[in-house]
Image (cartoon, helix red, strand yellow):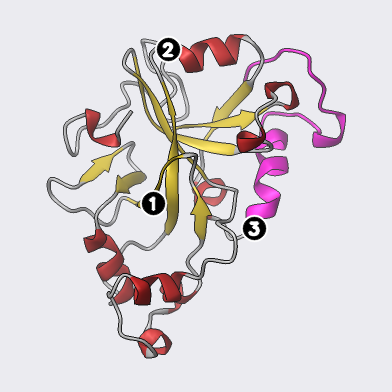
Amino acid sequence: MAPTGKRTGESTRSSGAGLPNSAGYLDGRLLIAMPVMGDSRFERSVIYLCAHSAEGAMGIIVNHPAGSIDFPELLEQLGIVKKGEHIKLPQNAESMKVLAGGPVDTGRGFVLHSSDFYIEHATLRIDDGVCLTATVDILRAIANGSGPKHAILALGYAGWAPGQLETEIQSNGWLHCDADADLIFGDDVDEKYGRALRKIGIDPGMLSNEAGHA
């Protein structure tokens, strides 16, 4: 499911922050993978749901690094900055995380970012604090210092067919919790899984395969 399924700029939320909307959809929340899932691609994943409706769901994994890919080097590969110019990048660009966002469309970049940055006809506003932009223009903005205050770049995304995510949740594949800026944009990628579980009162060391929903 592509993130452009909703009108640009339209909020996918219909109720208060952190709560499923009136139809029970979870866009704007975090999914937390359970051990019983059995899919290595999503092991210990924390996924920010960008879209969730009767048409399916789409999200970005926010805690899996994309190997040794370096953001300044990626900008050079894309021709956004010339080789050697990365030393002139703003600090937030130098330290920006490149993540493995999911197994779908892995050759494409998706930027989750704070809502202080918006590109008409290109940015999807997910809630009051988080947006998604998948055009190279946002990378140029980040490189020249005019981009969002907080951002992560993900290669690929996670997608679900209609009803698939609901089935996986009912089968105890996922828990879900409120999203917050630190869990989405924080630098401590390796700690996000444990922190997300603790956010809903679960000790990661005691995690079992028993069902439960936040």
- Within the image, what quadrant is residue 5 found in? top left
Q: Position of residue 160 (x, y in %)?
A: 43, 23
- Mark 1 nearby-residue class (10 Å; few <14, some 14–19, many ≥20): few
Q: Is residue 201 magenta?
A: yes
Q: Mark 3 vs mark 1: give the one in front.
A: 1
Secondary structure under the numbered disc 1 in the rendered image: strand
- CB within 8 Å, label 2 to label 1: no
Residue occupying the far right of the picture: 206
Residue type at tag 1? Gly
Q: Residue at x 13, y 45 (%)?
A: 121
Q: Residue at x 79, y 18 (%)?
A: 209
Q: From the viewer's perspective, tell me whether residue 144 is left or right of residue 122.
A: right
Q: Which residue is mark 3?
A: 188
Q: Which residue is mark 2?
A: 24
Q: From the viewer's perspective, tell me whether residue 176 is left or right of residue 116.
A: right
Secondary structure under the numbered disc 2 in the rendered image: loop
What segment is highlighted magenta in the picture? 189-214
Please, is residue 7 above or below residue 130 in the view? above
Quadrant where the C terminus lies?
top right
Q: Position of residue 206 (x, y in %)?
A: 86, 29
Q: Cα distance, mark 3 to mark 1?
A: 24 Å
Please, is residue 145 above or below residue 105 in the view? below
Residue type at tag 2? Gly
Q: Position of residue 102 (x, y in %)?
A: 49, 41
User: What's the mark number on residue 107?
Assistant: 1
Please, is residue 32 above or below residue 80 in the view? above
Q: Cα distance, mark 2 to mark 3?
A: 30 Å
